[in-house]
Amino acid sequence: MLYLILPVLLLFQITLAEKLYVVERERGSLAVIEDGKFKGEIKDLGNLNHSIVKTDGDFSYCIARNGYFSKIDNRTDRLIKKVKPGNSGIGFTFIKDYIAIAHYSPKKVSILTKDLDIYKTIDTGSRNVGIKPYKNLLVFSLMDKDQIFVLDADRDFEKVHVVENAGKMPFDALISGNRYIVGFFKERGVGILDLDSFEYRKATFKTGNKEEVVFKIPHFGMWGVADGIALIPAVGEKRAYVVDINSMEVKKHIPLEGLPVFISVSPDKKIAVVNYSGDRDELISVIDIQKLQVIKTFPAGKRVMHMRFSKDGSKLYVSSYFDNSLKIYSRDNWQLIKEITVPTPSGIFIVR
């Protein structure tokens, strides 16, 4: 009998072998989850509302809403350096051997070395959003000036292109292939910048020849993008839009149980999961991307804040804010595999 039990135990250990950093939103800390267990906390990181963690080799970097930027050693799970390049950091990205940080305040973009020393500062006179890398180019939008800046990291971050009158109040952006797609707070549709030719055009969402007001563009991190389509959570509507990301044509609406927040796509691009706000915030719905329909909806905890698939796509990690727990579900049958206590959890980030 022991010979039968050991392989099962080994398989369980392997399936939970990833390391995660989970944001403890009210504590300014990251919970360290490894091999399916709570291993400790990385503390004193600042205001972690809407914070982002990104990993680069043996180190992870965390941006806080109140301007702090931290470097963490993934091998020891220790904070090794914390700086404050601004008062309100909104996003960051890696570009070549540097880190670029977009700020609301002060109105600038900071270029840091990976040891968190200031290399260069670009004053913009605007809140800055949608910062993205493409090859040697750094692209971001100026929220208060309706512009898009393109800098060349190979030329000491020289400004090589500016899009004037890009749209009314750029709000966020994503990279799709060689295209920088920016959404606006005060204008319908999106702007599309070809990063090879620098050609720029605007596109509105349409169903056939009819223009459709999809919504006020939310953060693009809420979109699920898979094989040429975007699954977009509607604001104030119980549905998701299926949009051709090249033409911006609305292909379909998918009815949902509540008001959607995030749509997360599995690594194999076959399914997506949706969480909700309001009175249905305990639910998760599963969308079959080939059929473009909901195939399952199930309760996953009080106020589901974030979801992330494991690297191999076999599991779904879910943070339940009011349950103070990280829940791990099997993708095979959507049964709960394990529940780990984490205080006020929100964002989930895979370290390795």
Image (cartoon, rainbow, N blue to C red):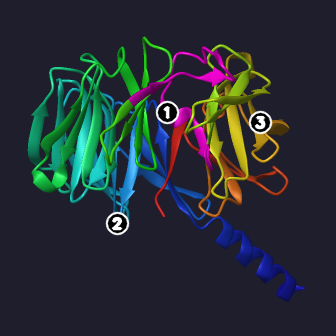
Q: Is the C-beta separation of discs 1 and 3 under 8 Å?
A: no
Mark 1 falls on what kind of element? helix
Residue bearing the label numbered 1: 220
Q: Residues within 10 Å of mark 3 (few under 14, many from 20)?
A: many
How far across and how far down the image is residue 350, in percent? 50, 55
Which badge, 2 or 3, comes first in the chain's sequence? 2
- In the image, residue 112 above or below residue 346: below
Instruction: Check disc 2 and give the amino acid type.
Output: Asp
Instruction: Check disc 1 and give the amino acid type.
Output: Phe
Please give the name of the residue rendered at 55% of the width and 39% of the height, measured from the top-left corner.
246
Q: How many numbered markers are drawn? A: 3
> Marks 1 and 3, Cα distance to the nearest angstrom?
19 Å
Which quadrant of the view contains residue 34? bottom right
Instruction: Check disc 3 and give the amino acid type.
Output: Ser
- In the image, residue 254 above or below residue 329: above
How far across and how far down the image is residue 333, in percent? 85, 53
Q: Residues within 10 Å of mark 1 (few under 14, many from 20)?
A: many
Mark 3 falls on what kind of element? strand
Please give the name of the residue rendered at 58% of the width and 31% of the height, measured from the top-left corner.
248
| Image depth: mark 1 or mark 3 in front | 1
Q: Is the C-beta separation of discs 2 and 3 under 8 Å?
A: no
Left/right of residue 42 with respect to residue 69 in the rendered view: right
How far across and how far down the image is residue 336, in percent? 78, 50
Q: Is residue 212 magenta?
A: yes
User: Is any part of residue 68 visible from this angle?
Assistant: no
Residue 58, label in figure:
2
Left/right of residue 228 with respect to residue 88 in the rendered view: right
For the N terminus, the image quarter is bottom right
Residue bearing the label numbered 3: 285
Which region of the structure is painted magenta? 201-228
Please give the name of the residue rendered at 29% of the width and 52% of the height, measured from the top-left corner.
94
